[in-house]
């Protein structure tokens, strides 16, 4: 995963105007030259113009926006060319363009995710998108490489790609922010240390979203520790509804479904109603009590309490570690798939009687879980980007006890980051290392 | 890219029957144990049975097929469970399952491609698929890792995943073979050396396809040198129509379209009729003479003969090298996208007036190109998996001369591999190294 840094790029408002009538070739060469003279980087301005779809002409560069405080990230390569998107939308019966920001955009998860987004896998074949890639100074060349591969993929729905290192530029007007980038845990670093380092990143990104993103932006936090990072992010973005912030627990849910299917000897599409409760850590609770297999309670089908109470959770949690052993890398592809699933669950109606898991803000939850934390719970959506918590779930002592444990951990994590959520001095007393195997 | 090796796995026909009534957990554990005792690997047999879709029961293992000569590769994990696919197909209005083999399945290109195939991106939302992953002994654990990530992705259309190291098992009944795996060029190795080493792999795979694949299998060769590998493969598979073998030049076409769009200052969806002629090497000919931009000849729109005749081709060919410099890895994602494009071009009707490039067998071509080689040419398809060559293309001296050069190279490559195509002794006089930058 890419390291996210936040040095604002140096801008020279005079530069783009030098090129107002030059063809893209010169722009491209100039970009390369400027990149060699870092930190003086060219931020060439976004291109505005209106051309009929069949009319061919050289692009016209607009001067950079000045004095508005709203900066935009760099458009990239062929995505800087001009066309009349409104006309395209009309011709193709497309919806209006939506802006999607991805942080850690040069990392492996993003390398899968960006191409899935561009292919229409999440939003469908009538939804043009703009991808806004956030990386670090260190990863900037890699970001260019990713953008080049997106160019070469010729995805018709991918209408804009821009790259940048400043979240205040990259998050401008985004309807979705997929926050994947986080610092990996260094050797000997405790979870508390990671919480502090990454917490600062997510506090900064929360502030940036608060300032420049769409007022109803949906935010999915993937960078670990994702629940508390999501909490920090939402606390720093009071202008965006807290409900809109998600911590990704969908890969855990998918893995839990697969293990239940495997144990029951059925195909995975027969497994439903699986909740991951709580933190994305080893205290997480994959819920077999409410899970169903072909509509029948999983406990009745599997009928092996010991396996369900012990081995099931272990299998779900060890999956990432086993994968690293076998494959030598972390599970980038299936993580990206689970991000797609998480997004799709919010933009398509949830199948009747089923639900999906997401780490969301606990205020007003019907389960008696402590308020003011981000906790994975069962959700349903009408497909409008919003969701509601599911009421018809059952609890037993075993489930309640485990939920209490993961809740206690999240409350302890919250105390560790009080300095980042505006709640005073941090006090950190995390008892043990609960990072999931195979994660950083 | 994974190295493909071909040691047939050691089979013990007694092993699977020991497990005929055990649950998958034991199978899984047993698999791990056996893997540690290599080369004695368990090839547990494919599962056959018929269950109503909503009926839950433990899987029943069938004995291995014996005496038929037809072996199957190992099913994997949850994909070994039982269900009644025919009933599923009926319930979901699905087409009949198709089998797709992918070699080099543990490599980075496959890591993108397999998930695209599983998501329905190529064959659509009503086409269930089986993925058969071919790897090497060395990459076997990585193959398991890939299969685990496919399990965890819960793709409803992905009904079977099997893994193996023996092409005679993995290619059983496949309708598509995507041959990505090839040995990378070692330090100091000449193209002739690479031709020989990889030629042997593709001769073997051709023989395996000839023996066990569907009689109308479509084969796309990606491993380099892909044109001559495809020739070797088809020569070793006389039972499959030569027309069905393709060498991938679609990434070159996509890159050419992007560069033309960039130069013209238009979005890439305005560029059409771009042919890559000849070899997937530096002698390849990206054709700007027949290319169109918004329906207008590209030469009229761009009006910069020097750029078209020199820089255009350089830019297309250097793309892979620039990408490695920037991104530190080869272009796995966009290569996978181009394989999807190549497949989709064969299973969906080509848009009116347009065409796509593919390296195909030259016999009967209308352009005067030498027969009996694999040469990239413009194709159209009715969407039935087949294609025809396009007649209405124009040539000028510049284009003809360059086509002659790439044709001469392919004829020289053919002489280098005569020992692998059944045409006597090889004689190798390749004049220069024409590997594309950034490729192995």
Image (cartoon, coloured by chain):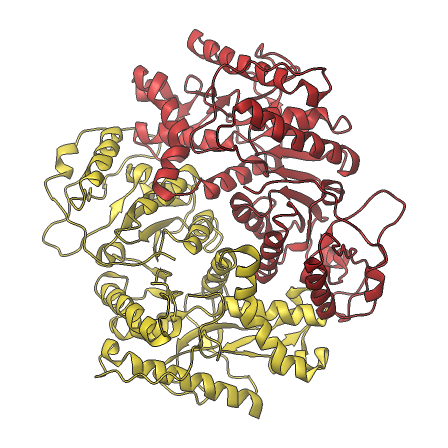
Chain colours: A yellow, B red
Q: Residue furthest bottom?
A: A397
Q: Quadrant of the C terminus of chain A?
A: bottom left
Q: Residue drawn 90% across and 45% down?
A: B67
x, y (%) of residue B188? 48, 28
Left/right placement of residue B86 relative to residue A327 reads: right
Q: Residue furthest top?
A: B397
Left/right placement of residue A44 relative to residue B199 reads: left
Please indicate, yes or no, whether residue B324 appears anywhere in the rendered image: yes
Q: Nearer the viewer, residue A114 or B181?
A: B181
Is residue A328 shown above or below A399? above
x, y (%) of residue A122? 47, 56
Q: Residue drawn 23% across and 41% down?
A: A47
Image quarter for residue A314?
A: bottom right
Q: Quadrant of the N terminus of chain A?
A: bottom left
Q: Residue drawn 75% across and 62% down?
A: B83
Left/right placement of residue B418 relative to residue B114 reads: right
Is residue B360 shown above or below A70? above
Q: Residue drawn 33% across and 60% down?
A: A175
Left/right placement of residue A223 relative to residue B337 reads: left
Q: Nearer the viewer, residue B169 or B12?
A: B12
Is residue B36 shown above or below B345? below
Q: Nearer the viewer, residue B133 or A128?
A: B133
Count numbered badges in the picture. Answer: 0
Please indicate, yes or no, whether residue B49 appears anywhere in the rendered image: no
x, y (%) of residue A60? 21, 34
x, y (%) of residue A27? 23, 33
């Amino acid at each position: 995963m890419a390291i996210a840094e936040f040095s604002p790029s140096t801008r020279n408002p005079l530069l783009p105007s030098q090129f107002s009538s030059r063809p893209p070739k010169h722009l491209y060469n100039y970009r390369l030259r400027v990149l060699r003279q870092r930190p003086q980087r060219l931020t060439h301005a976004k291109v505005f113009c209106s051309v009929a779809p069949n009319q061919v002409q050289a692009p016209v560069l607009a001067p950079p926006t000045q004095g508005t405080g709203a900066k935009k990230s760099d458009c990239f390569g062929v995505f800087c060319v001009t066309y009349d998107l409104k006309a395209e939308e009309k011709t193709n019966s497309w919806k209006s363009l939506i802006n999607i920001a991805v942080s850690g955009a040069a990392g492996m998860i993003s390398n899968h995710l960006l191409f899935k987004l561009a292919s229409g896998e999440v939003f469908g074949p009538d939804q043009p998108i703009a991808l806004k890639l956030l990386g670090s100074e260190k990863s900037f060349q890699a970001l260019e490489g990713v953008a080049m591969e997106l160019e070469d993929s010729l995805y018709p729905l991918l209408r804009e790609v821009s790259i940048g290192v400043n979240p205040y530029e990259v998050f401008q007007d985004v309807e979705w922010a997929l926050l994947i980038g986080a610092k990996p845990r260094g050797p000997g670093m405790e979870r508390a240390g990671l919480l502090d380092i990454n917490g600062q990143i997510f506090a900064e990104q929360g502030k940036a979203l608060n300032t420049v993103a769409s007022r109803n932006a949906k935010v999915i936090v993937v960078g670990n520790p994702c629940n508390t990072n999501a909490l920090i992010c939402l606390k720093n973005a009071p202008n965006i509804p807290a409900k809109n912030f998600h911590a990704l627990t969908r890969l855990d849910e998918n893995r839990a479904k697969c293990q239940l299917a495997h144990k029951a000897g059925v195909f995975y599409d027969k497994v439903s109603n699986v909740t991951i409760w709580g933190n994305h850590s080893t205290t997480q609770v994959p819920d077999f009590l409410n899970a169903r297999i072909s509509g029948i309670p999983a406990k009745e089908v599997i009928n092996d309490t010991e396996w369900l109470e012990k081995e099931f959770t272990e299998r779900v949690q060890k999956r990432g570690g086993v994968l690293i052993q076998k494959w030598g890398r972390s599970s980038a592809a299936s993580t990206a798939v689970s991000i797609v699933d998480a997004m799709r669950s919010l933009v398509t109606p949830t199948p009747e009687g089923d639900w999906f898991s997401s780490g969301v803000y606990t205020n007003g939850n019907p389960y008696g879980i402590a308020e003011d934390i981000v906790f994975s719970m069962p959700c349903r959506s009408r497909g409008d980007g919003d969701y509601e918590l599911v009421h018809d779930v059952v609890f037993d002592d075993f489930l309640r006890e485990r939920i209490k444990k993961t809740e206690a951990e999240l409350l302890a994590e919250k105390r560790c980051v009080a300095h980042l959520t505006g709640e005073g001095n941090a006090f950190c007393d995390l008892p043990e290392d609960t990072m999931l195997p195979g994660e950083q």
